């Protein structure tokens, strides 16, 4: 399964922030939309990711300073990205190695969407469930030895 297949099923709604956006405005967008991340774009270029991980860390370290911070001060600058043609198993491995929960999908410099760890896990589960059903059906309909020798 390819990343593009998951994006096709998930849809292409994107939520972004700019580096100069206030962290409190970004938190408001995330809370209002019930999302765990924002892709940080500067003039159409991916410059980072803001996830609940960065928010929790800055909340712990700085507490009430949250309102005076800009997204650029706390975002992850070296975000893991995927391409639409990437195999989902390769993506899973990269997500596990980097402890990444949200992955921007880029085709060149164009943002195609964002996949969460949940999106990937759901797609893999559904694919494996389908394969399981097919194998069980195949085994169930397998001719037993008596039927095979009686016909021949």
Image (spheres, grey):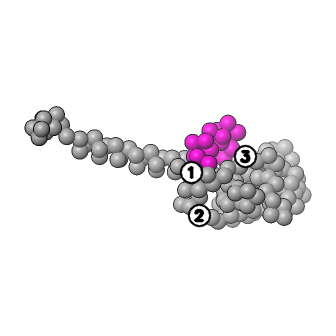
Q: Earlier in the sequence, mark 2 or mark 3?
A: 2
Q: Spatial distance from mark 1 to mark 2, Cα to Cα?
A: 15 Å
Query: Residue, x 81% and y 59% (percent of image)?
Result: 45
Residue closer to the observer: 118 or 82: 82
Residue placed most toward the observer, 150 or 16: 150
Task: Give whichever of 31, 146 is nearer the camera.
Answer: 146
Q: Quadrant of residue 90?
A: top right
Side of 100 where 71 appears, left or right:
right
Q: Which residue is mark 1?
A: 2
Mark positioned earlier in the residue sequence (1 or 2): 1
Label placed on residue 65: none
106 shown above or below 133:
below
Check disc 3 and report its element: helix, strand or loop. Answer: loop
N-terminal-most mark, 1 or 3 = 1
Query: Which residue position holds label 2?
Result: 11
Looking at the rendering, the stretch of residues picked out in magenta corresponds to 86-101
| Quadrant for the C terminus in the image | top left
Badge 1 marks a residue whose secondary structure is loop
- What number is the disc on residue 80? 3
Disc 2 residue crowd, few under 14, some 14–19, many 20+, Cα 10 Å: few
Dot in front, 1 or 2: 1
Question: Residue 43: horizontal and vertical position, in percent?
Answer: 84, 64
Secondary structure of residue under mark 2: loop
Q: Residue at x 44, y 45 (%)?
A: 128
Q: Residue at x 63, y 64 (%)?
A: 12
Provide the major secondary structure of the magenta segment: helix
């Amino acid at each position: 399964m390819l990343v593009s297949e998951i994006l096709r099923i998930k849809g292409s709604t994107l939520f972004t922030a700019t580096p100069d956006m206030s962290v409190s405005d970004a938190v408001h967008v995330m809370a209002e939309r019930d999302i765990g991340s924002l892709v940080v774009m500067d003039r159409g270029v991916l410059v980072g990711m803001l996830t609940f991980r960065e928010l929790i860390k800055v909340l712990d370290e700085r507490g009430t300073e949250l309102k005076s911070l800009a997204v650029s001060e706390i975002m992850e600058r070296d975000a893991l990205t995927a391409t639409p043609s990437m195999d989902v198993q390769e993506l899973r491995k990269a997500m596990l190695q980097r402890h990444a929960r949200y992955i921007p999908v880029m085709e060149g410099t164009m943002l195609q969407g964002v996949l969460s760890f949940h999106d990937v896990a759901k797609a893999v589960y559904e694919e494996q469930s389908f394969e399981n059903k097919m194998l069980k059906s195949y085994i169930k309909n397998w001719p037993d030895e008596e039927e095979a020798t009686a016909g021949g």
